[in-house]
Image: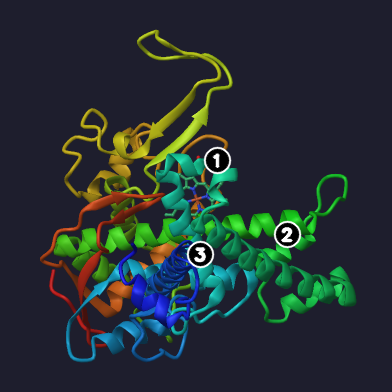
Amino acid sequence: MLPGSKWLSHQLGLEGLSPAVSSGIILCFWALSTWILAQVSSSVYRYYTICQYFRCFPQPPLQNWFVGHLGMAKWRHLCAEGSTYLDVFDHISLMTLDSLQKCIFSHDSNCQEKPSPYISSILELSVLITKRFNRFLQHWDSLYFLTEEGRLFSEACRLVHDSTNNVIQARKKVLAEQGPEAFLKNKGKGKTMDFIDVLLLAKDENGKSLSDKEIQEEANTFMFEGHDTTASGISWALYNLAHHQEHQDRCHQEIQELLRGHQPEEIEWDDLSQMPFLTMCIKESMRLHPPVTIVVRKCTKDIQLPDSRIIPKGSVCLIHIFGTHHNPAVWPNPEVYDPYRFDAQNTQKMSPLAFMPFSAGPRNCIGQNFAMSEMKVVLALTLLRFHVLPHEKPAQRKADLILRAEDGLWRKVEPLQEGSQRSI
Ligand code: HEM
């Protein structure tokens, strides 16, 4: 007899039926209730997880954080009462997504201020891919797409593909109406070419354009490869600079001197090559905390190692970026954060494969110049306006698809007064 059967039988009006039939109905009822409860719990959990991403927005800032940098208002607002503790990873992930959407689609998502279904789907896909990666049985498509997570994955993919496709179709319409020359001329009049424009106008040596599907795949690849990696790079750089105030002070002074007299305090293209110390700090941070820790390659021929052993053709090799960056034979005192490893004198002696955060060879990172520029702009403007301090809880490295921190990367952030001088 199932618990509560008598009471349930009464509630469902089954008293007149034979015990076998009423037990069957009660069993079905329990199964259905359990299934509904599981669905509701999973929806609540999903809603809660998505809300976690957006919990840091008590009041929308006026502008985007990266483009025009005035969105620093968000951190200023959070620091209104003085210093505050922030999970910088969460904030910066939204900022890198926001700026990529602007550069790829010319779309102001404002996702740092209010939830965006497109951005929620991208974040959800990243979480689902990591989970699937770690669950062996889910590697089979036929099994994965039967699961709840597989269904969520398909839904999120559909939303991302539809959004990208809508932009492509709208832009193609304008291109067809105006023709390529007028289209380009209009872009020259103030509007910047974005990644979709570049792909739409691209032609191979035979004059063949990319198909809609190819454009969609390229745009989505750049969205995925470009947001988490750069967010990881910026967040760990803030982490390391918070622990090394002397280096943070020197970066602050370098940026202050560079931007002295700039009205407004914007960073121009030429300024990017004028921040040598900040660049050294970013590189040393990517050595100690490489955003991508491993790459995989399949040998297309036999490879002979220095000790004469052979890796046979066809072998799949894991190339450990993190391991190389922490190998004491390559980097003496590898756990020490020392930006001077990257000053001009020392880099001359360095093997080209000792430092490879963007991988190496023909399939290295195509977005590395974009990433370095974004990291420099964001860090320069952050350090100009905020003093970043450590959190008492040490961060535990966590290698997902990219290098994260267990329970987030918490830092203490203190606003600096306009034009404030910091002692060195
Ligand atoms: C700090 C930031 C970044 C790091 C550390 C990084 C690192 C890497 C690495 C290690 C690879 C090679 C993967 C492999 O060999 O399997 C790669 C590939 C790639 N990255 Fe990045 N990346 C960063 C930012 C970006 C950005 C901002 C974009 C685009 C906007 C981007 C686009 C790509 C693409 C499209 C590939 C594939 C290239 C190919 O297969 O030919 N990355 N990245």
Mark 3, Cα crowd under 10 Å, few <14 / some 14-19 / many 20+, is: few
Q: Say the numbered circle drawn on residue 21.
A: 3
At x 28%, y 72%, the residue is 383
- Which amino acid lies under the numbered mark 1 shown in the image of this protein? Trp
Q: Position of residue 246 (x, y in %)?
A: 15, 62
Q: Nearer the viewer, residue 134 or 23?
A: 23
Q: Tell me the element at label 3.
A: helix
Q: Is residue 407 left or right of residue 423?
A: right
Mark 2, Cα crowd under 10 Å, few <14 / some 14-19 / many 20+, is: some
Q: Say the numbered circle drawn on residue 140.
A: 1
Quarter-wise, where is residue 7 in the image? Answer: bottom left
Q: Nearer the viewer, residue 401 or 367?
A: 401
Quarter-wise, where is residue 417 in the image? Answer: bottom left
Q: Position of residue 150 (x, y in %)?
A: 54, 55
Q: Tell me the element at label 1.
A: loop
Disc 3 to disc 1, how far (Cα)?
40 Å
Of tags 3 and 1, the one toward the viewer is 3
The reply to whether callout 3 and callout 1 are in contact (CB within 8 Å) is: no
- Which amino acid lies under the numbered mark 2 shown in the image of this protein? Leu
Q: Which residue is mark 2?
A: 199
Residue found at the far top of this picture: 308
Q: Nearer the viewer, residue 388 or 253?
A: 388
> Of marks 3 and 1, which one's residue comes earlier in the chain?
3
Q: Position of residue 25 (x, y in %)?
A: 49, 67
Q: Is residue 403 above or below residue 38?
A: above
Q: Say the numbered circle drawn on residue 209.
A: none
Residue 196 in view here:
yes
Residue found at the far left of this picture: 392
Q: Is residue 144 left or right of residue 178?
A: left
At x 15%, y 67%, the residue is 391
